[in-house]
Image (cartoon, rainbow, N blue to C red):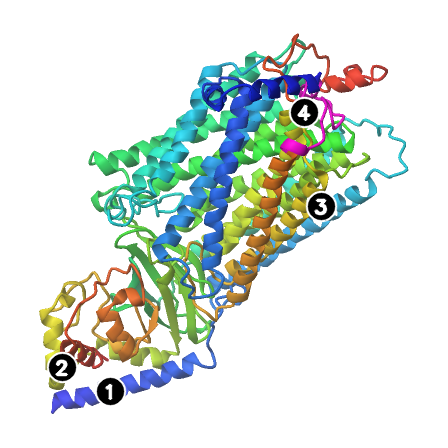
Amino acid sequence: MSSDAIAIQTVEAAGRPWVETLHEWVTTVDHKRLGILYILYALYFLVIGGVEATIMRIQLMRPHNDFVSPQVFNRMFTMHGTTMIFFVAMPVLFGFANYLVPLMIGARDMAFPRLNAFSFWLNFFGGHLLYFSFLGGNGLYGAGTAPDVGWWAYAPLASRAFSPGHSSDYWTIALLVSGFGSIGTAINIIATIISMRCTGMKLSRMPLFAWLNLVMSGMVLLAITPLSAAQIMLLVDRYLGGHFFDTQAGGSATLWMHFFWIFGHPEVYVLIIPCFAFVSEIVPVFSRKPIFGYPVMVGATVCIAFVSMSVWAHHMFTIGMNSYANSFFTITTMAVGVPTGIKIFNWLGTMWGGKIQFKTPMLFCIGFLFQFLIAGLTGIMLASSPFDWQLSGSYFVVAHFHYVIVGGILFALFGAFYYWYPKITGRMLNESLGKLHFWLFVIGFHLTFDLMHIPGLLGMPRRIYTYEPGRGWDTLNFLVTIGAFVQGIAILVFVANLIISYFKGAKAGNDPWDAWTLEWSVSSPPPAYNFASIPVVASRRPLWDLKHPEDPDSHYE
Amino acid sequence: MVSRAAGILVLLAGLLLAAGLCVADTPADHPVPNIFEPHSTPAESIRHLAYFVLAVTGLIFLIVFSLLSYAVVKFRKRPADAGSEPAQVYGSTQIELAWTIIPILIVVVLFLATARVIHAIQDAGRPVKTVEVTAIGHQFWWEFRYPALGIVTANELHVPVSDPSHPTPTFLKLLSADTDHSFWIPQLAGKTDLIPNRANQTWLDPQETGLFLGQCAQYCGTQHAKMLLRVYVDNPEDFNVWVRGQRQPANKDEKEAAGRRVFETTACVNCHAVVGTNGTGRFGPDLTHLMSRRTIAAGAAENTPANLRLWIQNPDAIKTGSLMPAMKLSDADLDALVGYLETLR
């Protein structure tokens, strides 16, 4: 059945002009196509953001290097951060949610298909608006160059006095536009999960993937709104004579920090919770056991969501808050570690006693578990506010959050790519290339980000385009740069695998991993309508019940 | 006659100072600002806390790492496996409770240890004898004012060594003239931001003499990277000598009158001050005792005549994007000006 679907599509595609195909993709409201658009769009920006990172790493390879000017370097780290968070991580996670949530809950599409398309295109144009800022050249001072105020654009650096021209405006409006897109997607995911579940799929039977994306979407609503409000206030400051953040007229620089980080910290969980979702689907399948402690996993996620709303000022331990405020944000931040730890233990419990198959998706998830453990523990160090007075704003912090974002989020994402690529394209990704990608990336990642902690401990602040020789930072920075190149090669292997396997990969069939959730019951790629008849489920693992009628889950739940 | 005597005195003081600096620079230098080699109480208590936190997190790491590795190795699928599914286990309330309660206890312990240090550093009482400094962050340099001593200087902070039996800590009031900055000398104290419209505070009581390095730790614009910070910890005698030197009026050697005229009649005076001239600008560093500093451009270059010349003529060559404009002086004027600046000891 699956091969028929592919055959029909190729015949159709061959006989039609490309403009028609393009038109179909641009006007699509199908959740699967929008999911693919999100993912491709994010991959494209991943490569751009990666190039920006490489430029920074070449510049920092040795002290007093002059590969780029300070102005260019400052633009690079601003664009790298903004791109990776807003135009890589969020779209790619929304893409997977879009593609998989309706399939997993037995629905034919998202609740609001048009809103879905609208959200995607907002995000798409937001990203391009940001990059539009590069056009113009230095002739128009500030008007034609990318923003250089850092991805959190602290006041008053982003005010008209210190950021003349329009570079900061591109940043502000790009985030405002894509922020509305994110809010639309979040509303859509929530509505879909609440109201589109198939018969028998009670909330307590939903795959963890759907649960975690539900929580993530709720957090998006709470986190993106203050960011959008702050962007509007910044625009009012810059163009309508407002003084919210204008310190020269009595405004408050710390007000912006509060607004930004009440978005910024929950944002970390907005990104990591969907990755928990990937891991919670992949680890059980490759351990051949159900997820350990399903209700606890749901509870821990909800707990993380609540507690993470009260930790934002740990990004601001150095701004001179009093000792009570510093103590409060220390305890709340450390408290997030408890539900997060519970999740790691439950994945461990899932593997315990299983029969672990080391396919590429599982390799990436195991990498995720080890690295996320370390990222969490360095997070505890940063939560201890006096320790943070030394670590904050240094390369230790840069290493810590890249451990979360690359070692955690990106590893889980690669796992997701290898796991669901067969469903999305109908072809398997090449296992040998996959393992090469994994090992190269592990080596590059650890070379870069393990070592990057140390210059921070030796007093190297972040966001400096060059540094003095003789401070013990030289060799470490050189090795960090080498690691970045190894990661770059690994990414090229991955992209090559995506392309080669699309044309030459082995046929996947409906259910290549012998998995248990509903998306594996339909053909690969799934038909436009997903399910010919809406499925009826009786447990958390409908396909297990189908495959093991003698011992179904529904007997135990 | 009096002025000559004063001149000699200043010269002597300068020489003494230079000698003192050389001594301080060579053996007791601290080129690597390692947070684990502290020389001041706040940095020292942070190190203690850091070791404790590292020990606890290290232990957690070892345990969880071992469990994960064990699971990955022990429960891997064997080639001989017939393909049957393992026992389907859904969870266990006791185990869940165990790995919830134990982390909560660890968090409580870590929090209490942290709260103690927060209180000890932030709410520390002031002894009778302190040095008060106001540090003002500028794009991209540091202004240091000692209100009680009547000293204004830049980029190189001098503080007395603090003997634990008779502590003389230095308390810094932190202000900003423009954007956010952060004051960070890793071996003396953790960082505290300088934020416009806000007065922050930090303190240090260095217990060893020498030069301690740091730099701005909050992104503040184009040349954030070259906003370097040098703290000279002097023994009490050297510190007094330095204070006396800084309180001397600016040199008025008539030999350099031409250079002074260049200074007074160009845009220099809009941003720079030299006490006793018409230069009273406050946008740039005070130059009254420029030659008492080892570096120029906030630590970006050694304070040598050649560098001074380059800095005046083409600041971008040393620090691209600094707010110092290229002065475009004739060679004669430039020579005279550099000659004059070199007398500001």
Q: Earlier in the sequence, mark 1 or mark 3?
A: 1
Residue placed under numbered mark 1 in the picture? B11
Q: Earlier in the sequence, mark 1 or mark 2?
A: 1
In this rendering, would A426 be left or right of A326? right
Question: Could you say which disc has been placed on residue A295 in the image?
Answer: 4
Density class for disc 2 (Cα within 10 Å; few <14, some 14-19, many ≥20) is some
Place of residue A417 in the rendered image (x, y in percent of width and height, measured from the top left):
62, 34
User: Disc 4 to disc 2, how far (Cα)?
Assistant: 82 Å
Instruction: Using the numbered discs, state the Cα–Cα distance from disc 1 to disc 4 in whole angstroms.
Output: 79 Å
Residue A167 visible in the picture: yes
User: Identity of the amino acid at label 3?
Assistant: Val
- Secondary element under disc 1, as helix, strand or loop, is helix
Chain for numbered disc 4 = A
Task: Name the residue type under label 4.
Answer: Pro
Where is residue A201 drawn, in percent x and y? Answer: 66, 13
Circles 1 and 4: CB atoms closer than 8 Å: no
Tell me the subunit letter for badge 1.
Answer: B
* Crowd tier of the residue under label 3, counting other residues whose Cα lies within 10 Å: few below 14, some 14–19, many 20 or above: some
Give the alpha-carbon distance from disc 2 to disc 3, as whole Å: 71 Å
Mark 3, secondary structure of its residue: helix
* Residue farthest toward the front in the current orientation of the protein: A15
- Segment tinted magenta in the rendering: A502-524
Looking at the picture, tell me which residue is in the foreground, B19 or A374: A374
The residue identified by callout 3 is B64
Q: Chain of mark 2?
A: B
Q: Which residue is identified by label 2?
A: B252
Q: Are marks 3 and 4 in contact (CB under 8 Å)?
A: no
Do residues under tags 1 and 3 come within 8 Å of each other at their CB atoms? no
Cα distance between the residues tagged 1 and 2 = 13 Å
